[in-house]
Amino acid sequence: MPGPVKPSGASARLLDSRAPTGGDQVAPAGLAQASAAANPLRNIAFGMALGLVFVQFSEIHQLLTYLIHVNTYLLYLFGIPTFLGVALTGGIQRTLRWRPAIYWILFLVWLTAGVPFSSWRGGAIEALRVYVKTDFPMLFVIAGLTITWRECQSMMRVMAAAAVVMTLAARMFQDNSGIYGERMALNFGTVANSNDYAGHLVLILPFLMWVGLTAKSRALRLAAWGGVGYGVLLVVRTASRGALLALIVGALYWLLRGTMRQRIALLAMGPVAAVAMVIFVPRSDLVRIMSFSAADAGASQEALESSMARRYLLEQSVLYTLRHPLFGVGMAQFTNFEGEQSQVLGAHGYWHETHNTYTQVSSECGIPALALYAAAILSTFLLVNRVYRQARERPGCEDIRVAAFCIMLAMAVFCTAIAFLNFAYYFYLPTMTSLAIAVYRAAQDEFASRSSGFVEPDQSPQRSPLPRRTAIPHAAATL
C-alpha cells in the first residue's frame, strides 16, 4: 500500500478518530506542516504554482503565441519562481518522502542511463533535455508547495478553469483546414491533433465535474455540468476511438464507485447523450468511431487504414521491446529506428511513433522503464484510493471523498486514452502524482483536525465590546 516512508507524526496519531465536525470546514495543516504553511516564501511560490499549473493544462501560452505571434514566455514567468520556491522551502524533500515520487525518480534515472545505448544518442539527449526542463519538474510543483486542504481545492479549481479554456478553444480555434476531415481539432498547440486533444480533455474534464459536484452556488454547478457535457461532446466529435473507450471506462468507473444517486443520474443521461450525439456530431465522425472491421460495407476507409497502421506499429514496438529489453532503441527514437530498419529490409517504413504510450516506453527505454512507469501510475492511484476509503468511512468528509473520486476518475480515463497516444514524456502523469501526494498529505491533517472537533475560526475583524456604564441612582444624580 503506498504511503510515506515516514508517516506524519501528528496525523498518524489521530487517524483512528471517527467524529469529524463537518464536510465543508477546512482545518489548518498538522503540526508537521504548520511551519511550511506559514512560510511567506512558500505562500508566494504556491501562488506562482497555481499560475504554472493553469498555463500547462490550459495551453494559454501556446494560444497567446498563436494569436499575437509573440512568445510570452509564460512558462518561464511562472515556472522559475515556482521551482525556486520548491527548492528553497523544502518542497523537494516533501515530495520525495512518497513512493510514487520515488518511482518517477527511478524512471528518470533509467532514461538517463539508457542514453549511451540509444540508436541515436544526439536525439535521445535532446529528448531527455526537454523532458527534464519542462515536463518532469511538474512532479515537485503541487506536492512540494501545496500544504493545506484549502490549497488542494484551489489547485483543483485551477485545473477546472483550464478545462473551461480548452473547451472554449475548440469553439473559437477549430481547425478547418480539412486535414482531419470533419473531426474536431485545434489550430494551435501540442494537442492540436484530434486524438491528442481528446486525450487532454478526458484528463481535465473530471476536475470541472468536481466543481459541479461541490460548488455551493447552484448557478456555478449548472455551468460546470454544462461545460462537462459540452466537453464530452467535443471528445466524441474528435472521432477518437481511444477516447471513446476512455469515456466508456469512465462511465463504468462512475457506476462502480459513485453513489446510488450518481448512478441513477448517469443512467438517466444516457438517452439524452445519445440524442445529442445524433444531432451535433457529424455522420462521418460517427461512422469513423464505429469502423472496426472491413467486413462492414459502410466502414470508414480512413479509419480502417489507421487501424492497420496502428496494429503494425504496435507489433513493431513489441518486437523492439523483446529485441532490446534493457534500454530499448533510445528515448523518442522509435520513429527513426522503425523507418531506418524498414529501409534496410527493403520496405518504405511508416516513420510514425508507436501510438501507444506503454509500448512507447518499453520499446524506447526498456522493460525496466515500463515497470517503473506502471508502478508510478499504480501507486498514485492507490494513494488517492486510500484517501477515498478513509473519507468514505468518516461522516462529514464528503468533500474529501468527492475530490478523491474525481481524481481517480481522471486517472482511469486518461490511462485508458494514452494506450492510443504518444504521451510517455509529457507532464500529465508526474503532475497527477504530485496532486495525489498533496491530497493525501492534506487529507490526513484534515481527518485529524476534524476528528478532534476543530472548527475554523471566523477570520473577519471583530469589534472590541464597549465598556458598560455603571447605573447612577436617581437620588445621587440630583445632588
Image (cartoon, rainbow, N blue to C red):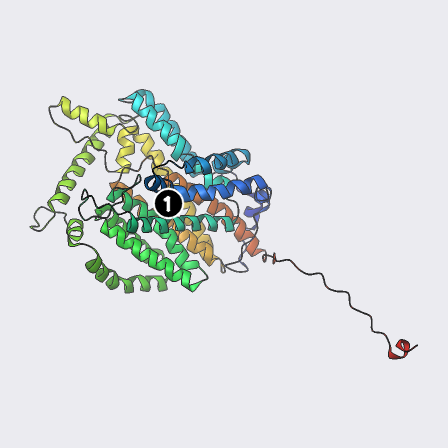
| Residue type at the position of mark 1 | Ser
Taking 411 as reference, is 389 left or right? right
Circle 1 sits on which residue?
58
| Residue count near mark 1 (Cα–Cα under 10 Å), binned few <14, some 14–19, many ≥20 | many
What is the quadrant of the N terminus in the image? top left
Label 1 secondary element: helix
Q: Nearer the viewer, residue 83 or 309?
A: 83
Tell me where residue 376 sits by quadrant.
top left
Instruction: Please tell me which residue is depicted at 14% across the width and 24% down the height of the picture.
Output: 343
Q: Nearer the viewer, residue 338 or 177?
A: 177
71 vs 208: above or below = above
What is the quadrant of the C terminus in the image? bottom right
Instruction: Please tell me which residue is depicted at 25% across the width and 60% down the height of the picture.
Output: 273
* x then y, percent, for residue 237: 23, 51
Tell me where residue 308 sits by quadrant.
top left
Tell me where residue 360 sits by quadrant.
top left
**Can see residue 2?**
no
Q: Nearer the viewer, residue 259 or 69?
A: 69
* x then y, percent, for residue 366: 30, 29
Q: Nearer the viewer, residue 388 or 179?
A: 179
* x then y, percent, for residue 244: 24, 50
